[in-house]
Amino acid sequence: MQKPELLRIKSYLDAIVGERNPFSSPDQLKRCGDYIADQFRRFQLTVSSEPVPFEAGSSDNILGYQMGTESDLDPFVLAAHYDTVEGSPGADDNASAVATLLEIAYCLQPVSLKTPLVFAAFTLEEYGFVGSHHHILEAKKNNKGFNGMISLEMVGYRDSKPGSQSYPVYVNATEYPDTGDFIAVVGNEPSTELTHQVTEGMRNSEPTLPVEQLIVPGSGIDFTEVRLSDHSPFWEHDIPAVMITDTAFFRNPNYHQATDTVETLDLKFIRDTTEAVAGFLERHLTN
């Protein structure tokens, strides 16, 4: 596996950050999708665009396929959404995760995987996970399944000040740090095994990165705050999935604001998260 680099990550962010919305900035949304597809091709992935019907006009999921030596195995999905809400340049939400997705694709180029891997840049997450819902339904139409899924959702904001981290009311905050300097792995009970695997794999791959874990009871249907990303449709279809996140509005005051800019991001935090997730995938998908 190749090592992630700050300069490449910054170059992705510079290319992506800016409002990307199907209603107010459809051209920018399209340009971002095209950019992601171009990067996937540079990294020797097989690329396809999956049209997603929507009231504001069709938008595309951008899919990059890294083949596995066991082609009959269901693929594992690593995903990040690339759209934004209106009025926000979307640096943390979710350019930080798209940059991580791209850099992991770069780093895993020389790795011979056993399990196929799909790098999925989903569209229209901000409108109810429309792109990821559509992708699952298309797979089911074609009698295809999934080995598991990781949703990268806001991975670029770190705050080491005491009291900078808050939690949902159903989480026992005394069991977790009060500083927002960790990355979180969130799963539901059916995804418990995958959640543990991802957490331990990330810790082993990048020991300097604090990684915290939360598993919500049952399917997670009653826990709205931890369902706000593209892992949620996978949970609804009983597919093991986790979200990797900086915890969004429980830490980042720029969430869905015009102030969600590149200058607020911690590039080293993104790089370390990239290293941790890529290392997990290398081991998990080659065994």
Image (cartoon, helix red, strand yellow):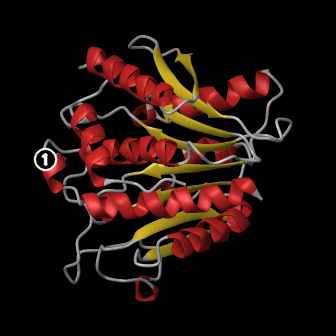
Measured from the top left, where is residue 143 in percent x and y? 83, 27
Q: Quadrant of residue 198?
A: bottom right
Residue 264 relative to residue 149: left or right = left
Query: Residue drawn 60% across and 62% down?
Result: 280
Query: Residue drawn 77% across and 28% down?
Result: 140
Q: Nearer the viewer, residue 116 or 180?
A: 116
Residue 266 relative to residue 242: left or right = left
State the residue position of label 1. 259
Residue at the bottom extreme of this rendering: 174
Q: Nearer the viewer, residue 67 or 220?
A: 67
Dot 1 alpha-carbon crowd within 10 angstroms: few under 14, some 14 to 19, many 20 or more? some
Look at label 1 and name its amino acid.
Thr
Residue 11 relative to residue 46: left or right = left
Q: Is residue 229 above or below residue 44?
A: below
Q: Give the quarter of the figure containing the C terminus.
A: bottom right
Measured from the top left, where is residue 223 in percent x and y? 53, 60
Q: Is residue 184 above or below residue 24?
A: below
Q: Give the quarter of the figure containing the N terminus.
A: bottom right
Query: Residue drawn 57% across and 70% down?
Result: 199
Q: Quadrant of residue 22?
A: top left
Q: Quadrant of residue 65?
A: top right
Mark 1 secondary-structure assignment: loop
Query: Residue drawn 34% across and 43% down?
Result: 94
Q: Nearer the viewer, residue 67 or 175?
A: 67
**Whether residue 37 can be seen here:** yes
**Whether residue 22 can be seen here:** no
